[in-house]
Image (cartoon, grey):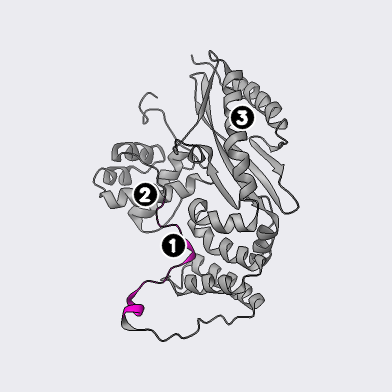
């Protein structure tokens, strides 16, 4: 009979909360902390957990972010959505550290958990707080969103950041570039973006239609950049086809799991890119790669067949 991890988690989270309070961070909900960066921004910290069920251990992967209040409130106003504290920009802390890879801290009944907490909080202080401060400003957001932002949302946030800085030309150009990129007009996401674009362009005093520009043949052939194209080299989650197949099965996707073993290198790279974007939201990595595989293999997103991951009898060791 394994040892339940709930008491261990409560003990460690209490200790982490005490240490984070010394950095000026306060708890919003379990595993979510904020710190004041000034009049317009909050630093965000998410303590994402993975639990070794019945094995007496769990790990925390801190995700660092910043919330720009004016930008996010304007976006919610345009789209008619309820305003809340969401990350304008975020990144798992391991990718902010010199190693530039996934990093988690493991806690167990037999370990010196206080020393592990000290090490994790020291990394948050050294690498996380500076990231929050830089990206709590509009210039920082404009500079770093192409690298750290979720690409589907960059098309919204980058024009908004330029608009709030007073750079109407840059905001207008980004919107028209996105509108001119290939989209299925019946796609709900495309319709949402056109609604957003119409509202922001009206505030910019610009027409919805792109201005006609006469170009040479070579210029016409050249693809036009969009907000999502900024930052050419994208980060990916790297995994084997076999590991992907196992994760798909844990969400009930047996048919896709059988196809995963024959995926091309290009399909695996694309899955890694999409999964990385999902993971930035704090999503469990297994679910991130499952959603990414569904999108690549079926040509569009949907939820997995099982809403909750099942490990027993599927995942090795369970």
Q: Which residue is drawn at 46% across and 71% down?
A: 186
Circle nearer the N terminus (2, 3): 3
Q: Which of 184 and 113 is in front in this view?
A: 113
Q: In which quarter of the image is residue 49?
A: top right
Residue at horizontal 43%, vertical 68%? 225
Is mark 2 in CB contact (under 8 Å) with mark 3? no
Q: Nearer the viewer, mark 2 or mark 1?
A: 1
x and y percentages locating residue 240 in the rendered image: 31, 39
Q: In this rendering, would 246 be left or right of 211?
A: left
Tell me the number on the disc at residue 121: 3
Residue 190 place in picture, x, y as percent: 49, 68
Instruction: Write the residue at 29% across / 37% down.
Output: 242
Span highlighted in magenta in the image: 218-234
Query: Circle 1 sits on which residue?
Result: 229
Judge whether residue 282 can be spotted in this image: no
Q: Mark 2 points at which residue?
A: 271
Q: Residues within 10 Å of mark 3 (few under 14, many from 20)?
A: some
């Amino acid at each position: 009979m394994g040892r339940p991890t709930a008491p261990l988690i409560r003990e460690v989270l209490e200790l982490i909360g005490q240490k984070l309070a010394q950095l000026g961070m306060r708890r919003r909900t379990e595993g979510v902390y904020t710190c004041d960066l000034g009049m317009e921004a909050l630093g965000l910290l998410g303590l994402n957990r993975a639990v070794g069920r019945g094995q007496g251990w769990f790990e925390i992967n801190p995700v660092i972010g910043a919330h720009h209040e004016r930008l996010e409130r304007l976006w919610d106003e345009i789209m008619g959505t309820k305003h809340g504290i969401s990350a304008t920009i975020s990144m798992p802390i391991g990718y902010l550290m010199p190693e530039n890879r996934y990093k988690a801290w493991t806690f167990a009944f037999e370990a010196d958990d206080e020393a592990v907490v000290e090490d994790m909080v020291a990394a948050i202080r050294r690498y996380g707080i500076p990231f929050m401060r830089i990206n709590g400003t509009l210039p920082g957001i404009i500079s770093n969103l192409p690298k750290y932002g979720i690409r589907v949302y960059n098309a919204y946030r980058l024009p908004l950041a330029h608009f709030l800085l007073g750079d109407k030309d840059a905001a207008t150009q980004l919107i028209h570039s996105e509108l001119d990129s290939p989209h299925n007009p019946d796609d709900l996401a495309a319709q949402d973006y056109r609604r957003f674009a119409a509202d922001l362009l009206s505030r910019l005093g610009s027409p919805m239609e792109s201005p006609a520009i006469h170009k040479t043949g070579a210029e016409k052939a050249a693809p036009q950049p969009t907000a999502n194209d900024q930052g050419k080299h994208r980060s990916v989650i790297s995994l084997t086809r076999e590991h992907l197949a196992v994760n798909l099965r844990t969400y009930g996707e047996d048919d896709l799991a059988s196809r995963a073993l024959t995926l091309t290198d290009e399909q695996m790279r694309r899955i890694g890119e999409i999964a990385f974007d999902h993971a930035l939201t704090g999503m469990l990595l297994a679910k991130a790669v499952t959603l990414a595989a569904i999108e690549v293999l079926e040509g569009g997103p949907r939820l997995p067949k099982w809403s909750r991951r099942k490990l027993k009898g599927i995942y090795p060791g369970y």
